[in-house]
Amino acid sequence: MVQVFALVVAALALAGGAGAADGPVRIVALGDSLTAGLGLPANAAFPARLEQALRAKGMAVEISNGGVSGDTAVGGLARLDWSVPEGTEAVIVELGANDTLRGIDPKVTRQALEEIVRRLRGRGITVLLAGMRAAPNLGPDYARDFEAIYSDLAARNDLLLYPFFLDGVATDAKLNQHDGLHPTAAGVDAIVARILPKAEELVARAREKRGM
């Protein structure tokens, strides 16, 4: 009887472990209004549309919308612990647009993003860093210092990098709302289509960590 009980317990433990290993990868999209989906219904925002695209590829994922309109890199850092709850396996970091719109010193943005990355990696969380371009009116020196943040952080920390979150969308009026800053639903879909290969890599890396 004792042996039978032990076998049952072992089988249940193995079943529970297999379930966890096969469960959806839990992802948080940490960002500003571009992630939050300002001006769009929740199901048209970037996290929801990316989740749908990954599932269509056969990938089991759950993506939480951790976007807060108006947030800077410092703001994202301040709320990091409650925006990225325990159990999160991967994070897409999309911050910096409001920093450049406000002309915040790139050193401040860099320090905040560095700390975000350090904390996430310390928790064993896989990171995809989405870059941003500087506002053109701030001049070439600012643009150089600001835009280098993302490639530098990615290279030093072995992060996945998507160089420009609004690639293919930023200059297309048909893909932006009337403010010229925030993508329409079609614009979000264009972002998702372009970032999808990197998101697939993110999911693959997170799954690999489960087996470590």
Image (cartoon, grey):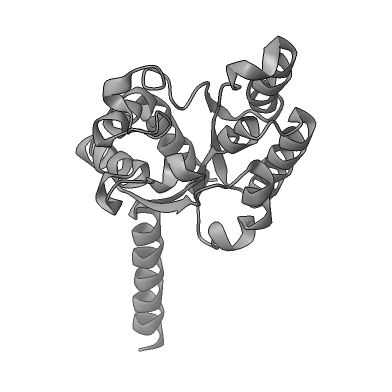
Does 100 sit left or right of 176 as displayed?
Answer: right
| Quadrant including the N terminus | bottom left
Residue 207 visible somewhere in the drawing: no
Does 162 sit left or right of 49 as displayed?
Answer: right
Does 11 sit left or right of 152 as displayed?
Answer: left
Q: In which quarter of the image is residue 64?
A: bottom left
Nearer-the-camera pick, 91 or 172: 172
Q: Residue furthest left?
A: 56
Residue displayed at 36% across by 22% down: 169
Q: Residue furthest top?
A: 140
Q: How many labels does the image show?
A: 0
Where is 2 relative to 125, above or below?
below
Nearer-the-camera pick, 63 or 209: 63
Does 196 sit left or right of 83 as displayed?
Answer: left
Q: Percent x, y for residue 18?
A: 36, 58
Where is 161 relative to 6, above or below?
above
Q: Percent x, y for residue 32?
A: 51, 44
Q: Percent x, y for residue 208?
A: 48, 40
Residue 194 visible somewhere in the drawing: yes
Where is 16 relative to 164, above or below?
below
| Quadrant including the C terminus | top right
Q: Quadrant of residue 143?
A: top right
